Image (spheres, rainbow, N blue to C red):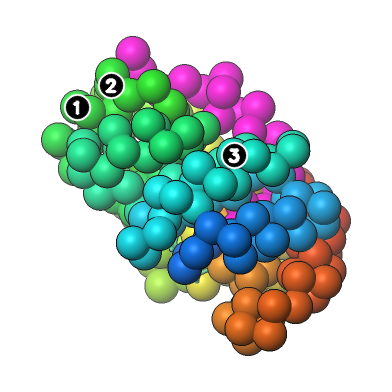
Amino acid sequence: MTQDIATLDAIVARAPVIPVLVFEDPESAVAIGRALVAGGLPALEITLRTPAALDCIRACRTIEGAVVGAGTVLDAGQMEAAVSAGANFLVSPGASPRLMDAAASARAPLLPGVATAGEAMTLMERGYRRMKFFPAEPAGGAEYLKALASPLPQVKFCPTGGVTLEKAPKYLALPNVMCVGGSWVVPADAVKARDWGRIETLAREAAALARG
Ligand code: 3PG
C-alpha cells in the first residue's frame, strides 16, 4: 500500500513535538517515556542507534497512552525488526529505493526523510504526502521549508534536526508543517541524573507549543 496518511495524521495530531530518543536500556526508557507522556508528548521516536533500542521499543509499548515509533530505520531488516518489536510507526532520515520498496508492505506507516524538492517529488510518485524534513536547521531551516509550501502544497513535513523550543514556533507556524521532532526534551545530563521531573517539565513546555 502507499503511505497510511490517516494513521500518521492521527499520531501527530496528539502533540506538536515528537521527541527523538536514544535509549540505552529498557528500564530508563520506560521512566523517560512515562515522563514524556505525563508531560503531554505521547508519540515517542525511539531511534535504532543503540543495541537496546528494540527492547526499549517493546518496553515502552507497555506505557499507557504512548504511541511508539522506531527512528533511524535505514533498511528493510531494521524495518521488520522494529515492527516485530511493536513499533506503531517508523521514521527514516532519508528514503532509499529499497527502503521504500520494503515500506510498501510494512505493517506500520513510514515517515521518510527528505531535504529537497526533488526528493519529496520522488516520494510523491509513490503516494507519499507526509515526510520528515531532515536535517532541518542545516538544510535551510524554516525559510527553506516555507519555500517548498507553494510548489508542493500536498506535502506536510515534520522538521527535525537542530530544532529547539525556541526554534520550533517558526516551523509550527508554517502551513506545510504538522509537527516538529527533536531531542531537546531529553537532555543527556537529565538522563544521567535520572531527573525524570525535569524531562516531564520540558515535555510540558513542548506540548504547549501552538501550531499555526
Ligand atoms: C534525528 O536524530 O532525527 C535528529 O538528529 C534529532 O535532531 P536533534 O538532536 O538536533 O534534535
Q: Residue at x 47, y 68 (%)?
A: 24
What kind of element bears circle 2? loop
Write the start and end of the magenta stretch as one range: 1-19
Rendered location of residue 129, percent (x, y): 44, 29
Rendered location of residue 185, percent (x, y): 67, 68
User: Does residue 98 sit above or below 56 in this rendering?
Assistant: above
Q: Residues within 10 Å of mark 3 (few under 14, many from 20)?
A: many
Left or right side of 43 for 20 = left
Q: Please indicate, yes or no, whether residue 88 appears anywhere in the rendered image.
A: yes
Marks 3 and 1, how far apart at CA: 26 Å
User: Does residue 143 sit above or below 76 in this rendering?
Assistant: below
Q: Residue at x 44, y 50 (%)?
A: 55
What kind of element bears circle 1? helix
According to the image, label 3 marks what residue?
61
Q: Amino acid at mark 1?
A: Asp
What kind of element bears circle 3? loop
According to the image, label 2 marks what residue?
104
Q: Residues within 10 Å of mark 1 (few under 14, many from 20)?
A: few
Q: Amino acid at mark 2?
A: Ala
Q: Are marks 3 and 1 in contact (CB under 8 Å)?
A: no
Q: Are marks 2 and 3 in contact (CB under 8 Å)?
A: no
State the image quarter where residue 207 is shown.
bottom right
According to the image, label 1 marks what residue?
101
Left or right side of 54 for 29 = right
Q: Amino acid at mark 3?
A: Arg
Rendered location of residue 115, percent (x, y): 35, 54
Q: Nearer the viewer, mark 2 or mark 3?
A: 3
Q: Please indicate, yes or no, whether residue 132 appears anywhere in the rendered image.
A: no
Q: Residue at x 41, y 72 (%)?
A: 138
Rendered location of residue 29, percent (x, y): 59, 60
Q: Indicate which disc residue 145 carries.
A: none
